[in-house]
Image (spheres, grey):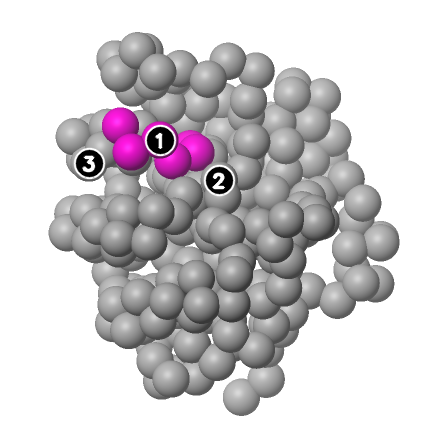
Amino acid sequence: MSFWIKTNRFVKRIFPNYIWDIPNNENKVFLTFDDGPTPEITEWTLEQLKKYDAKATFFCIGNNIEKHSEIFQKLIQDNHAIGNHTINHLKGWETSTDEYVKNTRKCSLIIEKQEARSKKQEKGKALFRPPYGKIKPSQSRVLRKLGYKIIMWDVLSYDFDQTITPEKCLENVLKNVESGSIIVFHDSLKAEQNLRYVLPKTLAFLKEKGFVCEKID
């Protein structure tokens, strides 16, 4: 098994327009969750975060927001940050730039509608994570020009990989996290088994080591 858990400095240097980590002197780390909202899993995730007074950033799929709007409202009510993950988990490398941008903006409209419903809109912030981490330079240029911050990651848990054990998934995180790390989890059915094992232990570890879990803004 060979995969890329920790994003190396060379990649960060050659793609400087993407946010890979958020260096700071306050021991802050940034938990992120992709692909939700998902019934039961997202709600359970919120419960775990609340136990440790942790904030996070949820990169949501537009179709899931529409199907599970009440769960999405809980993300807003608990004061977590919301990011755009396209309408239907679109793979940038296989999509025209025009279609990709339209898809992303459509997802943003869904998010804005829900934020208006909650009366907790956060104007001027547009966080975007490309599904699979795959985005063409042309797509990136247009989205950044429109004001989106493209959020990648420093540590990939691989919770979505059903061929690895929960123990290995936990190791992926604990051995690589450092101040400023952006860590990727998934509140999805595919990741559920690993996430339910890893997230409580990660939160306990971070608290014990003096890390503070913040949302991205």
Type of amino acid at the residue the image marks with label 1: Asn
User: For this rendering, which residue is in front, 166 or 14?
Assistant: 166
Q: Residues within 10 Å of mark 1 (few under 14, many from 20)?
A: some
Who's the residue at 37% across and 67% down the image? 204
Q: Quadrant of residue 13?
A: bottom right
Which residue reaches farthest bottom?
A: 1
Q: State left or right for residue 60 relative to residue 126.
A: left
Residue 169's spot in the image, x, y percent? 43, 77
Type of amino acid at the residue the image marks with label 2: Lys
Circles 3 and 1, Cβ within 8 Å, touching? The answer is: no
Residue 56's spot in the image, x, y percent? 42, 44
Which residue corresponds to mark 1?
79
- Mark 3 and mark 2 lie on one chain; the one further toward the N terminus is 3
Q: Quadrant of residue 194?
A: bottom left
> Where, quadrant-wise, is the C terminus in this rendering?
top right
- Mark 2 and mark 1 lie on one chain; the one further toward the N terminus is 1
For marks 3 and 2, give the one nearer the viewer: 2
Magenta stretch bounds: 77-82
Q: How crowded is mark 3: few (under 14 residues within 10 Å), some or many (20 or more)?
A: many
Type of amino acid at the residue the image marks with label 3: Ile
Q: Quadrant of residue 195?
A: bottom left
Who's the residue at 60% across and 43% down the image? 151
Examine the rendered structure and indicate whether residue 118 appears above or below residue 175: above
Residue 59's spot in the image, x, y percent? 43, 41
Which residue corresponds to mark 3?
71
Which residue corresponds to mark 2?
215
Circles 2 and 1, Cβ within 8 Å, touching? The answer is: yes
User: For this rendering, which residue is in front, 193 or 190?
Assistant: 193
Q: How far apart are marks 3 and 1 (CA)?
A: 13 Å
